[in-house]
Image: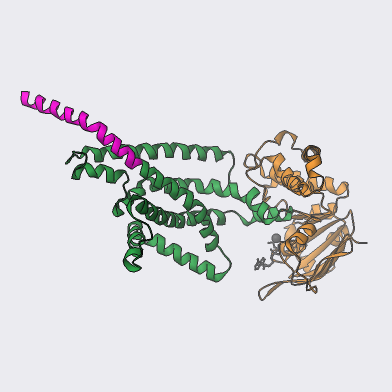
Chain colours: A orange, B green
Amino acid sequence: MAILEVRNLHKSFGKHEVLKGISFSLEKGNVLSIIGSSGSGKTTLLRCITFLETATSGKILVDGDAIFDGESTVKPNAKMRREKQLNFGLVFQQFNLFPQYNVLNNVTLAPRLRAKEREDYKQNKKQILAEIDAKARTLLEKMGLSDKLDFYPCQLSGGQQQRVSIARAMALEPKILFFDEPTSALDPELTGEILKVIRELADEHMTMVIVTHEMTFAKEVSDYIVFMDGGVIAEEGAAKELIEHPKTERLQAFLSKISD
Amino acid sequence: MQDFFQNLSQQFETFFTQFPVVFQSLNVGFLQTLKLFCTTLLGALPLGLVISFGSMSKMKVVNKITRLFVWIVRGSPLMLQLLIIYYFPGLVWHKPIWGGGEDGRFLAATVSFIINYACYFSEIFRGGIQSIPIGQYEAGQVLGLTKTQTFFRVVLLQVIKRIVPPMSNEIITLVKDTSLARIIALQEIIWAGQAFMKGSHGISGAIWPMFFTMVYYLFASGILTVLLGRLEKKLDFFKV
Ligand SMILES: Nc1ncnc2c1ncn2[C@@H]1O[C@H](COP(=O)(O)OP(=O)(O)OP(=O)(O)O)[C@@H](O)[C@H]1O
Ligand SMILES: [Mg+2]
């Protein structure tokens, strides 16, 4: 069964329909890249799936459970939405780190607050917090940031900040990790370090959805690519095949424009 | 020449006999000034936060009414508000709700100052809250934080950092603005100093106590400047 399935998703802002029926599915451990020109609705799609926007209609299933159903008349309350949200991690284009926390605390904040809701929190507080701390350190080590634990975001380069934000998203062990153009706010010489980290995550079979303009990277890291154009999926297919042998004219035009 | 020195020594003598009386009286006045300053801060900070939420409310009615209120209060002189709040109940309803004497005047002054300063604070709070990038709220949300957690754990300190400089200005202005309560004869320090010009404790026509009140203001605003400056420094460890 697919870990994520999106069925006929629509989203309008007022009269402007941005998503015009998006459907795709993603297998556990796979990497899906979303490409497409500016304004085609890639960010909106990610935001709808991760509940930062509410889709107008359609269905989103995680492990077969509908976490969003446009038909449903039941309005999910804040707590339900929060539970569903935790299926997903999201890495923002602009990092959005918390400036007043150091690197370690940026990563541990959410897990610590979440642990407070555990029934055994009072009894095992010390142990729980120690585990959270140890896990954050491991994650940050993996991101190559062991020597930056007590640095504040303003003391880090863009690439380092983005790596912290990846660790922060991973700390809650999301089933699926979403990236919205994780390198486009970075200087070209810093994009490499982020792509390397994502590549490593892919090797560990982290399930990921990546919006990116880096075609070479998308081709090599992802299993599957969807090409969005004007709010619909104009073409989709296995990564290498899609990039090397685009079938539709729209994708051909897009790829040739990008490679200039 | 001799006359001059004799005159001077006489003046010194009167100064030294007057000083303890004036000092005592100004201290009492300054205590009232400080009391008004503290109660205004204590009341206006929380009320200002409430008003700022009102002015950011998504409910149109609440939003419009709050903003109208803030505009009226900020757009008219505090002195006028003091006069209205103090005299209106007695003159119009024939019910002096403030009670008589110094306590009544203090209560009326406190209420006027709290309302006035809460409106100024609310605009600073609103500016501070609205200047926090939406991405901070969204990051909190996708990490499964509740709205309350996001506000207190993520947003609040950033807001505080942003509002410390404008709040410092307002707070130091407040020290000096308390003197406006003189208009309803609150016995704060200016009132106490002025009494020696008109005649009080057997001293009249003395101007130097007025200058001396200035020392108190400079002392108070000096201390506040240092303390608020330290707070600002303390928050220097991060950038927003
Ligand atoms: N909150 C919003 N209100 C109104 N319109 C919006 C909103 N968010 C996005 N849009 C519109 O939706 C369309 C798609 O935007 P979106 O950000 O999803 O595109 P994108 O594919 O991510 O583009 P880019 O590559 O530039 O990031 C755009 O025309 C945009 O103006
Ligand atoms: Mg986008």
A72 vs B33, nearest the viewer: B33
Quadrant assignment for the C terminus of chain A: bottom right
* Left or right: A8, with A39 as reference point: right
Residue extending farthest right = A1
A27 vs B76, nearest the viewer: B76
* Left or right: B131, with A33 as reference point: left
Residue lying at 74% horizontally and 72% vertically, measured from the top left:
A56
Q: Which picture quadrant has residue B71?
A: bottom left
Tally of numbered discs: 0
Residue lying at 35% horizontally and 53% vertically, measured from the top left:
B105
Q: Quadrant of ligand 1?
A: bottom right
Quadrant assignment for the N terminus of chain A: bottom right
- Residue B18 in percent (x, y) is at 21, 33
B183 vs A215, nearest the viewer: B183
* Left or right: A244, with A48 as reference point: right
Residue lying at 88% horizontally and 56% vertically, measured from the top left:
A223
Residue B176 visible to an observer of this rendering: yes
- Residue A211 in percent (x, y) is at 76, 58
Q: Is residue A14 above or below residue A94?
A: below
- Residue A195 in percent (x, y) is at 78, 47
Q: Which residues are magenta?
A: B1-30
Prevailing SS of the magenta stretch: helix
Q: Which picture quadrant has residue B93?
A: bottom left
- Residue B156 in percent (x, y) is at 60, 49
User: Is residue A36 located in the magenta-colored stretch of the structure?
Assistant: no
Residue B1 visible to an observer of this rendering: no
Q: Is residue B122 above or below residue A104?
A: below
User: Is residue B6 located in the magenta-colored stretch of the structure?
Assistant: yes
Q: Which picture quadrant has residue A135?
A: top right
